[in-house]
Image: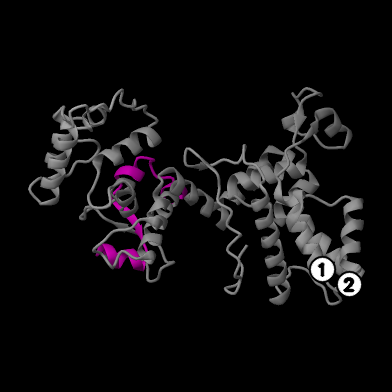
Amino acid sequence: QNLAADYSSRALANADKLVNNLPNHINESITESRLLSYKANAEEIARWALTNNALRFTCSDKQSTTCATSFIDNFAYPAFRRPLTNDERTEYTAIVRNSPEGLRWAIQTVLMSPQFLYKTELGVTVAQARAQSWGTGTNFTQASSTAYALDPYEFASALSYMYTASSPDATLLQAAANGSLENPTQLATQIDRLMDSALGKEHVGRLAGMWFRTDAVTSASRTGDATFNDSVKQSMAQEIREMYKYVFYNNLPFTDLYKGDFTMLNSTLSQYYGISGGGTSATDWRMVNTATSPRGGVLASGAFMTVNAHSGRTSPILRAVHVRQDLLCQNIPLPTSFEDTTGERDKATARAQMLLEAGNLTTTEFYNIQTNVQGTICFQCHRAIINPLFALDDFN
């Protein structure tokens, strides 16, 4: 997972297909270009691993049977997330042994194989499971013999990707092998372990970045502020993830995400915001009380305010729409018409924009014009969004 600094291939990052801002690959097809990128990834990773002696298995003689067995048990097995069949073991043993470059070819073959690239959830019938001496646990007692269930390794993979966004570790694979995942108590222990792991915590934070859409701050641009650099933007995105993790893992009220008088700061953001008490490095995140500052909670964070704004000015409307639709699941109807036969709406909007940019209007006054003057192009939408509290903000 962590490649060295000299790992040069950037093709590894095949962009996720997003549905409503969340990764969803159900309808994603494998095109030739995507296939070739997987091939390039596999070749580069194999080259890197052998060049940097980064193999997690022993191979003093890279064409020996011992090396092939170690490769299968310690690389192919966790990559496939299940034990290899006898035919697969025979095939990979032959690949390793039949060429001086066999080990490199074996690594590339595993990383290109469907068994690695696809997470299977085919399952077997409960009757088949019982015939294979599993499927006898508490979860199966009421199941029909014709119902389908994931096999232990498929179930381990489902758990691992759900809670860590990664493949099962050795402990979870061992639990699958010995049948302990059928025991509700041991299953709960594994879930707690996964969620408390470093990957589990990273995954919880990743959810916040996608849900609040604050990861988009990393590609935001603002003129006239040279200090708003990549380090600041990356830190702003991570601030949301760290805040969410802090609330989640400390069992704080969910409302603290929105109105809590605290945030999480590293050294970069502590300096950028001018708030002391942050960490001493870019990776050192600390909870900082912000009761005496205009910050605290997701809605007043740098990432949220930046992403939900125009390039040159703030936007209570964008923030309100995002919160109401994506966080509160409220439906805001689309306007029925944008028809402007006279051009008066465009003129009114332009006049208000000029006054705002010249400093002759406050943001509140600007949106009052946009909302209350029916000649403006934004009238219909704004009336559906703004409430007596001026969208969601309680500041001018």
Q: Is residue 217 magenta?
A: no
Locate residue 238, reporting x and y percent: 42, 57
Report the Cα–Cα distance between label 2 and label 1.
7 Å
Q: Which mark is residue 251?
A: none
Q: Residue at x 41, y 46 (%)?
A: 213
Q: Is residue 61 left or right of residue 200?
A: right
Residue placed under numbered mark 1 in the picture: 103
Q: Is residue 180 visible?
A: no
Badge 2 element: loop
Front residue (pair 349, 44) = 349
Give the crowd class for mark 2: few <14, some 14-19, many >=20 residues within 10 Å.
many
Looking at the picture, how far across and down is residue 198, in whole percent? 56, 58
Q: Which residue is mark 2?
A: 63
Residue sitting nearer the eye, 326 or 297: 326
In the picture, the quarter occupied by the N terminus is: bottom right
Is residue 260 shown in magenta? yes
In the rendered structure, the answer to whether residue 85 lies left or right of residue 46 reads right
The residue lying furthest to the front in this view is 342
What range of the chain is rendered magenta? Answer: 246-275
**Can the viewer see residue 287 in this picture?**
yes
Q: Amino acid at mark 1?
A: Leu
Q: Return the residue nearer the eye: 363 or 283.
A: 363
The reply to whether discs 2 and 1 touch (Cβ–Cβ < 8 Å) is: yes
* Residue that appears at 64% across and 52% down: 33
> Residue 205: image x %, image y %?
47, 51
Does label 2 or label 1 sit earlier along the sequence?
2
Q: Residue 377: x percent and y percent? A: 22, 32
The kind of secondary structure element at disc 1 is helix
Q: Mark 1 packing: few (<14 Cα in 10 Å), some, or many (20+)?
A: many
At label 2, which amino acid type do we have?
Gln
In the figure, is residue 244 to the left or right of 391? right
State which quadrant residue 391 falls in: top left
